[in-house]
């Protein structure tokens, strides 16, 4: 097939590489414009663009995907299918209906559960034990198109959003190749979505604020689901702290209050039971083990962690 690939973040790199290494022809890659990022606010290319440039594939970066000039270029390319993986803009019907085999999307959930931009984070936060990849034919709705193939995967107890995203990205790469093969041979037919519908809206930085009134297991899942982005955070004496790793403790404590502290242990009360902090990131510093943090920070029992 002659393919145009739409994608932007690291999650989309493995599927792009799989297509580049396959029998299919990737005639162009469409990704978001270069953006400023980091402390120096330098302009950086996204991971998908970097991979496309390595493979010497034409890269298109429309500011607005509905732009008439861009749609005309895409029409002239005449792809037999468009593959979309975490692109970051909603495609208009003119693009969705352009290729003969349709726009095929890799979505990181077992649709119709967790439609939306943050399915990996939400599945972990909600305490799910399984998730997966869905390939689907895109329509004009938010992840509402008919399903082609699905593959399930276990969510491990120690998974973060980052580690699960990496595994799902590779799972999606294989499932995408199976999907394209099945479309070519006619061995797959789009089926309407069925089952429980749920949503996972786009995450914001402020979504990472820790609510200490939640139970210890809920906090554990929340912190896992927020790692690495947007990051679970709290405040201690006006200092913003990112909490990157914790384990639950059976003992009860006052929500958001330091219950016990030693040279290598920090236990904080939750709405039910407590958590022991394993990894933390103070402002302006790298992530560190709790022992290293406590060497340079004097904490006492009874100190309160707050929301501001």
Image (tube, rainbow, N blue to C red):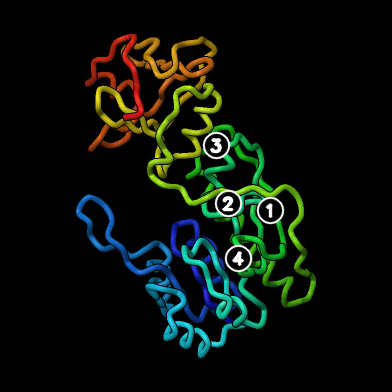
- The percent coordinates of residue 139 (x first, y second) are 64, 69
Residue identified by numbered label 3: 125
Q: Secondary structure at mark 1?
A: loop
Mark nearer the N terminus (4 vs 3): 4
Q: Label 3 crowding class (10 Å Cα cut-off): few <14, some 14-19, many 20+?
A: many
Q: Is residue 284 left or right of residue 154?
A: left
Cα distance in 3D space between marks 4 and 2: 14 Å
Q: Residue at x 66, y 46 (%)?
A: 153
Cα distance in 3D space between marks 3 and 2: 17 Å
Q: Secondary structure at mark 4?
A: strand
Residue identified by numbered label 1: 112
Q: Residue at x 50, y 43 (%)?
A: 161
Outermost residue, left direction? 40
Residue 133 appears anywhere in the view: yes
Q: Secondary structure at mark 3?
A: helix
Mark nearer the N terminus (2 vs 1): 1
Q: Is residue 263 left or right of residue 9?
A: left
Which quadrant does the N terminus fall into?
A: bottom right
Mark nearer the N terminus (1 vs 4): 4
Q: Which mark is residue 168?
A: 2
- The percent coordinates of residue 143 (x first, y second) are 62, 60
Q: Quadrant of residue 19?
A: bottom right
């Amino acid at each position: 097939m002659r393919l145009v690939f739409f994608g932007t973040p690291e999650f989309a790199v493995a599927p792009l590489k799989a297509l580049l290494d396959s029998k299919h022809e990737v005639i162009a890659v469409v990704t978001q414009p270069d953006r400023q990022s980091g402390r120096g606010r330098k302009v950086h290319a996204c991971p998908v663009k970097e991979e496309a440039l390595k493979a010497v594939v034409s890269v298109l970066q429309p500011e607005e995907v509905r732009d008439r000039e861009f749609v005309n270029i895409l029409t002239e390319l005449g792809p037999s299918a468009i593959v979309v993986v975490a692109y970051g803009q909603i495609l208009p019907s003119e693009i969705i209906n352009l290729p003969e085999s349709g726009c095929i999307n890799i979505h990181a959930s077992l649709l119709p559960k967790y439609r939306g931009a943050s399915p990996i984070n939400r599945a972990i936060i909600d305490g799910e034990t399984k998730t997966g990849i869905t390939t689907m034919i895109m329509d004009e709705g938010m992840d509402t198109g008919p399903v082609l193939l699905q593959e399930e995967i276990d969510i491990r107890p120690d998974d973060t959003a980052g580690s699960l995203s990496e595994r799902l990205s590779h799972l999606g790469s294989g499932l995408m190749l199976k999907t394209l093969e099945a479309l070519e041979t006619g061995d797959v037919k789009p089926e309407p979505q069925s089952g429980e519908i749920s949503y996972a809206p786009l995450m914001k930085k402020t979504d990472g604020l820790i609510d200490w009134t939640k139970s210890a297991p809920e906090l554990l899942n929340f912190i896992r689901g927020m790692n690495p982005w947007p990051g679970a955070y709290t405040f201690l004496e006006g200092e913003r702290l990112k909490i990157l790793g914790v384990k639950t403790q059976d003992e009860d404590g006052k929500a958001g209050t330091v219950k016990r502290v030693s040279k290598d242990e920090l236990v904080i009360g939750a709405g039910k039971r407590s958590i022991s902090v394993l990894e933390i990131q103070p402002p302006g510093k790298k992530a560190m083990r709790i022992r290293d943090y406590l060497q340079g920070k004097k904490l006492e029992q009874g100190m309160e962690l707050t929301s501001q």
